[in-house]
């Protein structure tokens, strides 16, 4: 999709620090980390948000969640971690390409703001 920063990362037009990649999924470090580990998991194919992905391609959604768990293992987050997907304006979504945040490496507070 044009004008999508994450599609440009998938296309290699914008650099990213990739921590895991498969044929269908990419995981890279967030440019503005909110925890010692802050990795974004995205489907290579563009979907606007989690609801769109689950509705149109549930098999790919499962692969995105599997990659989030795999990243947690790779990053050594044995103490626990958090998976977040912000959706829409009320959810605080700023990039309209579905992604999971994997956050860990410190004790995380609850509830989020
Ligand atoms: P959200 O606000 O939930 O849509 O999350 C979007 C995330 O993308 C934010 O945490 C940003 O810091 C992150 N982000 C934006 N641009 C880039 C980029 N070029 N590389 C890595 N992370 C990015």
Image (cartoon, rainbow, N blue to C red):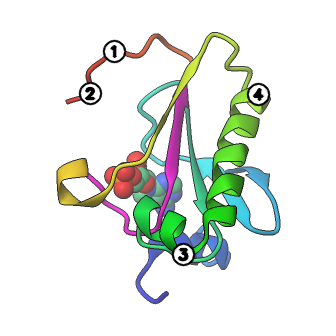
Do callouts 1 and 3 mark residues in contact (Cβ within 8 Å)?
no
Residue 24 position in % (x across, y down): 75, 68
Q: Is mark 2 within 8 Å of ligand 1?
A: no
Do callouts 2 and 4 mark residues in contact (Cβ within 8 Å)?
no
| Foreground of the two, 18 or 92 | 92
The quadrant of the image that shows the C terminus is top left
Determine which quarter of the picture holds residue 104.
top right
Residue that carries the numbered disc 1 in the rendered image? 109
Mark pair 3, 4: CA separation: 28 Å
Classify 10 Å Cα crowding around label 4: few (below 14), some (14-19), many (20 and above).
Answer: few
Q: Residue at x 54, y 75 (%)?
A: 56
Question: Helix or strand or loop: what does disc 1 sit on?
Answer: loop
Q: Residue at x 26, y 21 (%)?
A: 111
Q: What is the number of the mark on residue 56?
A: 3
Q: Residue at x 69, y 59 (%)?
A: 26
* Magenta run includes residue 3: no
Residue range in magenta is 92-104
Q: Is mark 1 within 8 Å of ligand 1?
A: no
Q: Along the horizontal axis of the image, is 25 left or right of 41?
A: right
Q: What is the number of the mark on residue 73?
A: 4
The numbered mark, 1 or 4, whose residue comes first in the sequence reads 4
Q: Along the horizontal axis of the image, is 27 left or right of 70?
A: left
Q: Along the horizontal axis of the image, is 19 left or right of 109?
A: right
The numbered mark, 3 or 4, whose residue comes first in the sequence reads 3
Compared to residue 90, the image places residue 47 above or below, namely: below
Do callouts 2 and 1 mark residues in contact (Cβ within 8 Å)?
yes
| Foreground of the two, 90 or 39 | 90
Mark pair 1, 3: CA separation: 33 Å
């Amino acid at each position: 999709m044009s004008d999508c920063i994450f599609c440009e990362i998938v296309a290699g037009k914008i650099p990213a620090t990739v921590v895991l990649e498969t044929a269908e999924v990419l995981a890279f470090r967030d440019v503005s980390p909110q925890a010692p580990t802050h990795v974004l998991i995205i489907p290579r194919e563009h979907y606007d948000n989690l609801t769109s992905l689950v509705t149109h391609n549930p098999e790919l959604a499962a692969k995105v969640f599997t990659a989030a768990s795999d990243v947690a293992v790779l990053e050594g987050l044995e103490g626990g971690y958090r998976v977040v997907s912000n959706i829409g304006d009320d959810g605080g979504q700023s990039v309209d390409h579905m992604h999971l945040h994997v956050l860990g490496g410190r004790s995380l507070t609850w509830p989020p703001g």
